[in-house]
Image (cartoon, grey):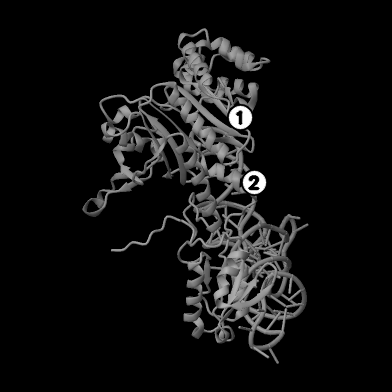
Amino acid sequence: MPPVDVSPPSGTRDLFPADVLLRRRTFATVQDAFERHGFEPLDTPAFERLEVLTGKYGEEGEQLIFRILRRGEHAASGEADLALRYDLTVPLARVVARYGSQLPQPFKRYQIASVWRADRPGRGRFREFTQCDIDIAGGDTLVADATVILAVVDALAALGLDGVTVHLNDRDALHGLVAAYGIPEALGASALTALDKLAKVGADGVAAELRERGVAAGAVDALHADLSAADPTAALVARIGTDARGRTGLERIAALQALLPDTGAARVVHDPVLARGLGYYTGPVFECTHPALDASIAAGGRYDGLIGMFGDEPVPAVGGSLGLERILLILAEQQGQEAGGQGPGPDVLATVLDPDDAADVLAVAAGLRAAGVSVDVYAGGGRMKKQLRHADRRGARFALVRGADERATGSVTLKELATGEQTTLPEDAAARFLRDRLGRADGAGADADGTTSETA
RNA sequence: GUGGGUGUAGCUCAGCCUGGUUAGAGCGCCUGGUUGUGGUCCAGGAGGUCGGGGGUUCAAGUCCCCUCACUCACCCCA
């Protein structure tokens, strides 16, 4: 080991060219989908005042906040006053509380950004990861809930993920479930956690775990029987319907389902044991799954109480979040890409055979770039052999040679790496030749990329 | 946090059970196969305190103990 450990801190990653490019494309796709649904971008600081974050994520979540020690003369105190953001929902709540009256009502925003959790890293689990959130603050109708789900489904579809299933449930229906089976309120959350594993461990497994968690035998048997029924959902729904609050939840789920047009992008099912994110959710909750991964790739729900924690008035809100890292995992596998790979190379790699040629080669390269061709001028020294090998590894389409011979005759030599075909042609014909071979339309200048030259 | 697994060359690993001359392979890397031609091929080369510490032994990569790191399952999440 070297004196300094040069591997990234555990739970973080170095992203190589191919990784970054894939992520950029993915973000752009998600962004477009969200904007098509009327969401606007918002960005907030990477760190917040500590007190903004505390008391929002529950006891376990609180432990996972990355705290930032006080600086300067207070450094010795060892106290923290700031913290890295833990998610994007709480910062949104803060923004709504701070600028509420200036924002459109309802305020629909999306945010794609890194968040940090002092978690124990594992597979598909990082201490720094990208969240991709959409939320509607100030929307108290089911249209808001439906919009979030539709936008999430559209984003997943736009990414090329087929076969997504949306699991729907409702916080009130969950309360109703607990009450209808006679499970004590105190055991409710624990029992729901066990029920949530149904798909994983089956009815028997759930029953066993419920017993372990102290649920009475009568309730366990009743649940076991219903979970083993030919149509477990129908059996559970019938039971939940015997509870008033449960009925409220069931009706809301039905109303929400009725609002979702069948776009063919995803299957929507009522999943009465879906219990995720029980923390601050107050109404409908949802989760999206994909057959390629044994975990959720998106989730969300209604949380009417959170924003009110920062202000005087409660603000109803509903949101959702895409599990970008997991989606990228699926996409990377689908496309057979390996981490650490190179991105697509430049159109042309220009060799510099002799240091004295440098100014001339740079000038030729500048001319080609002006014609819309990307040119990488080799920045290392060495023989032609080495430079061509580098061109090959960089994935350049062409190698350009402009040495003493070419300069003397006002020409350039272009070699297409894939075929080995090589031509020497007049200098002023190079751009046209390249544009033709690269399949670029003639005439246009550099591609529009948002770059503008500023004149002071 | 509980239990299992793995740490040997830049990477993936073999060698360990049945201690014993200079610790290996594949890939990668570097050089060469004459003048300005890559990807293929051929030849050569560099690179390892065997995660760290202690112990047993004439002798430890190999056996024992401790420690650290990584990893899988449970838990929790995105």
**Residue A308, numbered circle:** none
Residue A424 in view (yes/no): yes
Q: Position of residue A183 (x, y in %)?
A: 50, 14
Q: Which mark is residue A334?
A: 2
To which quarter of the image does residue A161 belong?
A: top right
Residue wearing tag 1: A264
The residue nearer to you, when weighing A226 against A453, is A453
- Position of residue A436 relative to residue B45, above or below, is above
Q: Earlier in the sequence, mark 2 or mark 1?
A: 1
Residues marked 2 and 1, same chain: yes
Hey, which residue is sitting farthest front in the picture? Answer: A443
Residue at 63% in and 17% down = A232
Q: Which residue is drawn at the image coordinates 49% and 81% (left, top)?
A: A360
Please, what is the three-letter code of the amino acid marked with disc 2? Gln
* Residue sitting nearer the eye, A19 or A10: A19
Position of residue A76 measured from the top left corner of the image (x, y, whole percent): 25, 52
Which amino acid type is marked by label 1? Gly
Q: Nearer the viewer, residue A359 or A57?
A: A359
Q: Is residue B76 left or right of residue A75?
A: right
The percent position of residue B13, horizontal first and vertical second, equals: 69, 57
Q: Quadrant of the C terminus of chain A?
A: bottom left
Task: Report x, y in % for residue B44.
Answer: 71, 81
The chain holding disc 1 is: A
Q: Is residue A123 visible?
A: no
